[in-house]
Image: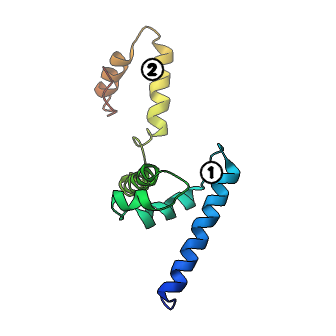
Amino acid sequence: MRLLPMSNRDKDVEILALRHQIAVLERDLGKEKVRFDPSDRAFLAALLHRLPRDVLRRVRLLVRPDTVLRWHRDLVARRHAAVSRPKRPGRPRTVHSVRALVLRLARENPSWGYRRLHGELLVLGVKVAAPGK
């Protein structure tokens, strides 16, 4: 919004000043890498992902264009994962009385395995999840 009232000449001057500052930063950092916060990554990814790859390569950035595109893919994947995540993960908890019964049966019959315990619970009319294979 701030750029709308600016003339093209003013925008060009600001772009040149920003590019020069990036060049100074790159020169001063040398071989060190710049660390971006997740919010910085999200902002750059959202801003730059629509640019064609050849244009993106000409833009002066502190990171490679492929990095920006990877940040965008990660951003979209995280958003999709957050939306599709179940409200309550996992299986519902077993009722306390059923847990107590299972533990009592296991304690009183130490030679029984989980399949036998499951069968006895079914005979008693207690429905629990089927044992795994």
| Front residue of 53 and 111 | 53
Q: Which residue is mark 2?
A: 105
Amino acid type at circle 1 is Arg
Relative height, residue 32 to residue 68 (above, below): above
Crowd tier of the residue under label 1, counting other residues whose Cα lies within 10 Å: few below 14, some 14–19, many 20 or above? few
| Position in image of residue 119 (x %, y %) | 30, 21
Q: Quadrant of residue 90?
A: top left
Q: CA distance from mark 1 to mark 2?
A: 57 Å
- Mark 2 Cα-neighbour bin, 10 Å: few <14, some 14–19, many ≥20: some
**Quick one: 130 or 61, which is closer to the camera?**
61
Q: Identify the residue at horizontal 30%, vertical 32% (top origin).
A: 125
In depth, the one of 83 and 65 nearer the eye is: 65
Left or right: residue 51 compared with residue 31: left
Can residue 2 be seen from the camera position used here?
no
Relative image position of residue 100 (x, y in whole percent): 50, 30
Q: Is residue 17 among the parts visible in the rendering?
A: yes
The structure residue drawn at horizontal position 49% and vertical position 24%, both measured from the top left corner, is 103
Q: In the picture shown, does residue 133 fall above or below 4?
A: above
**C-beta proximity under 8 Å, tags 1 and 2:** no
Question: In terms of secondary structure, where does tag 2 sit?
Answer: helix
Left or right, 100 with reference to 25: left
Is residue 122 found left or right of 77 in the rendered image?
Answer: left
The amino acid sitting under disc 2 is Leu
In the picture of the structure, the residue carrying the numbered disc 1 is 35
Tell me the quadrant of the picture where the C terminus can be found. Answer: top left
Q: Residue at x 39, y 13 (%)?
A: 113
Indicate whether 130 appears above or below 93.
above
Q: Which mark is residue 99?
A: none
Residue 91 or 39: which is nearer the viewer? 39
Mark 1 against mark 2, which lies toward the viewer? 1
Residue 33 position, x and y percent, is 62, 46
